[in-house]
Image (cartoon, rainbow, N blue to C red):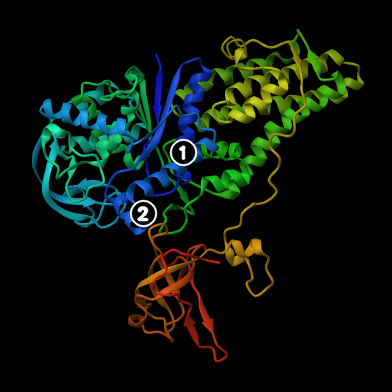
Amino acid sequence: MTKYVTTPIYYVNDVPHIGHAYTTILCDMFKRYQVLKGNECVLLTGTDEHGQKIENSAKLKQKSTQEYADEISFKFQNLWNNFGIAYDYFVRTTDKYHDIGVKYAFEEMYRNGDIYKGHYEGNYCISCETFFTKRQLVDEFFCPDCGKETTPLKEESYFFRLSKYENKLLEWYKENPNIILPLHKKNEIIKFIEGGLSDLSITRSGFKWGISLPPFVNDDKHIIYVWLDALLSYITPLGFGNDNLNKMYFFNDATHFVGKDILRFHAIYWPAFLMSLNLPLPKKIYAHGWWTRDGAKMSKSVGNVINPEEIANTYGLENMRYFLIREVPFGQDGDFSRKALIERSNSELSDTLGNLLSRLLGMGEKYFNLTIESNNFDYLKNEIDEVAIIIESLEYYMENMMPNRYLEELWKIFNIANLSITKYAPWDMMKEQKVDDVATLLVFVANILAKGSLLLYPILPNSSKEIMKSLGVDFSHYNKIILDNELINTFKLTKIPPLFPKIEKPAIETNINKINLKDEINIKQFDKIDIRVGKILEAKRIEKSNNLLVLNIDFGESIGTRQIVSGIANFYKPENINGVLACAIINLKPSKIMGVLSQGMILTTEDSKGNLSLLSVYSNTELGSKIG
């Protein structure tokens, strides 16, 4: 049976960030692991391009909605191509076949009695494209997911009978206890359902950017709710409801990877839609945590978003893949740190794995002209048995989505190899003419690297293939040396460049406080300073301070709103600078000034008498424009 794995369908209101990369790399790892085991596996990813937020963003950018969606979707696809993600389908919700499939699904659910027309009254979060009841809101008005203000809505709508599937969903979870991992996330979903499911509004009539209702409804006021539209993108590329070549049998064994913030959509709405359509339900739903930075969730408005392409280009794609998978247990939040990435790369990839391969190739060339062989491993029996026990345990960790433990255990076999070299000291054995024992030790080390390189393939596909090439092994050896636990007796080694050169220091320094701006700087240092144009929306005095104002500044859709503290209160009244287009440095590390968070620095000029003036620009300058 073909296994089918999906990333979330990424929303095109933003460029790809480290969270998108993490999910996609996990899915790529899952697929490569299945292929390694001899299973067929198909990977789908893509972009979710409809909804009011996209329509609004396109208007702000002064672009057509389709042009804006095309631009962002291309960035996602291009990044995954550059990262070597082995996807088979890239779906866009603006694809014609998807439009046809969504209309077909709506009609099927309608004819099954699961869709009816009524009136919706409640609150809608434009940012999350999500409806909320009063009991779900924070302080009766704010979105429980993103914290932004919701919009009260009272409009005609078509509803999906979600309440009809309440008991069926609970039965499904009971019959499939491991359907959601980590397990505590499943318990949260069950608790939510047990609180009662309301029917779901699945159309909108306040904007036009979306899929229209099928012709039989004869109602052109409505478009289909973006989440129904997006979730169906998991099956429309397989031919559901359209003229694509029918590959729906892939969906008989489907695994979804999602962030914890969208688990409810995938664990409640999606299976209910599938039940209504009489389609198979997912086999697994894996919910991962968020990546934070300095303990805070990454956000455009805070300015702490990590660009994965920058990280990959600076430290190496495989170093980044290893760090993201190894650093935190699946399902938990992880704090992204360049320092931690460097330390793991140097200690585990360079010192342990890279150095082990270099030692083998060096001694193999020096003592045996790169051809090593042995048939008797008696004196290494304890080490061989220990390696076999570790390798046998690895499948459990990967099958239960514990890839960090998988790597932790795998690294133990590389440590055994390094410790064996130290313990038996082949350089001393050569002096004692124990040539056969040295050859045996090196063949043992080569076997560990051969087994390890195959097992590393899902996480480090390029590096593992380089190791295999240096050892003269390939994927055809998997059954023999992994499943049957046999040893290879002869290796013809090939020297390769070092795989994981040491990273001496952080290659990117983002804290511009470390630059003394009164000293001479070069163009590279200046390029680190990100100066943007923003509109001051509100200015207020800070209590107990004579010279500080806290400014709320809009830097446009791509950056968002920032709060900046500035010492200009002696020169400007707060009410006189509202609406001013000011210039500010936005990539300073956020800090607290008199207990108030400041997310940048307003630029000013100072005359010979010490008077400050805001550095501002013409009123027609686009918000977020870069200075420099």
Residue named by callout 2: 63
Name the element at disc 1.
helix
Does residue 347 appear to the left or right of 229 in the view shown? right
> Which quarter of the image is occupied by the C terminus?
bottom right
The crowding category of the residue bearing disc 1, from other C-alpha atoms within 10 Å (few below 14, some 14 to 19, many at least 20), is some
Q: Earlier in the sequence, mark 1 or mark 2?
A: 2
Q: Which mark is residue 77?
A: 1
Report x, y in % for residue 322. Answer: 57, 36
The three-letter code of the residue at mark 1 reads: Gln
Q: Residue at x 69, y 22 (%)?
A: 469
- Tag 1 and tag 2, C-beta contact below 8 Å: no
Q: In the rendered image, which quarter contains the N terminus?
A: top left
490 on left or right of 414: right
Question: Residue 182: image x %, image y %?
Answer: 38, 32
Please give left or right for residue 25 compared with residue 355 in the image.
left
Residue farthest top in this picture: 375
For residue 432, above or below residue 545: above
Give the number of the disc on residue 358: none
Are there few (<14), some (14-19), or many (20+) residues within 10 Å of tag 2? Answer: few
Along the line of sight, which residue is nearer the eye, 419 or 375?
A: 375
